[in-house]
Amino acid sequence: MKEYEYQGGGTYLKKETAKFQKLHYLQKNREPRLHSTLTPPVSMNRSFNYLSHFTAVIMLIASIAMAESANSSFNQGFEKHKKGDLKNAIQRYSTALEENPSFSMAYQMRGIALQQLNQYSDAISDYSKVIATGDNSFKVVGYYNRGIVKNMIGDFAGAIPDFSQAIELDKKMAAAFFHRGIAKGKTGDLNGRMDDFRQAALLGEVNAEKWLNTYFPDWKQPQKPPVAPLPPTEKTT
């Protein structure tokens, strides 16, 4: 039987994370309106409170400006990325991250560019940042992409937990079942590979289905539970 040879796997970009919204940060840090008619402070405490609120507003406006700048840098990097200018794309993503260190999408796209340049260690680091900074829709992609890179460098044992985490977050992620199956096969877990390929195929993974149709044409048939052996009978004297 031909073992499925690992040919890598494209990075995964779910719809939820692919929709980069320019107003994302502005919506999360909406600027409060400043009223023109403020009651004059009549005590030191009120004066201090007014100053504190005014300072907070100034800081908020500054953070919004930084977010807009980060978005602009990201957009520039994304345009260069689409044109195949990976090195300059990485530079612009890095600028976006300097301006906003919690920018999950920038970590993700920089990781993809680094992976395309075969800079696997740095790509793994960026995917780890995606997991650390993003919500679940980002985490599932970060775990999957990190698992892909680990498979590509031969760290199959390390890839399996990443794919498992992705599946825990998205139980219908066919690609994660498929590539976990490859990793399991490479570590000698052939039954695990079979189970994952079957699940991947049922979820629509074409490569898994082709492999199963070639080597296990009856894979769609219900699996028969193992028959338990009968207990030994006692001999009567």
Image (tube, rainbow, N blue to C red):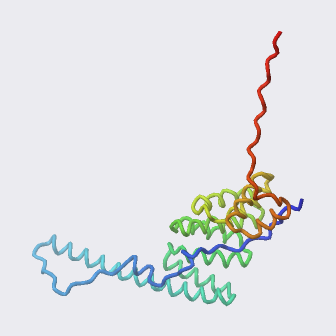
In this view, the residue in front, 176 or 22, is 176
In this view, the residue in front, 195 or 53, is 195
Q: Position of residue 4 (x, y in %)?
A: 83, 64
View extreme (right): residue: 1
Compared to 169, does 91 lie above or below?
A: below
| Residue at (40% x, 76% y) in the render | 28
| Residue at (58% x, 80% y) in the render | 94
Compared to 49, does 212 lie above or below?
A: above
Query: Where, by quadrant of the figure, is residue 155 drawn?
Result: bottom right
View extreme (top): residue: 237
Query: Where, by quadrant of the figure, is residue 207 drawn?
Result: bottom right
Compared to 232, does 91 lie above or below?
A: below
In this view, the residue in front, 211 or 76, is 211
Q: Position of residue 170 (x, y in %)?
A: 59, 63
| Residue at (61% x, 83% y) in the render | 91
Q: How many marks?
A: 0
Classify the position of the C terminus by image quarter: top right
Q: Position of residue 78 (x, y in %)?
A: 60, 85
Q: Is residue 171 left or right of residue 118?
A: left
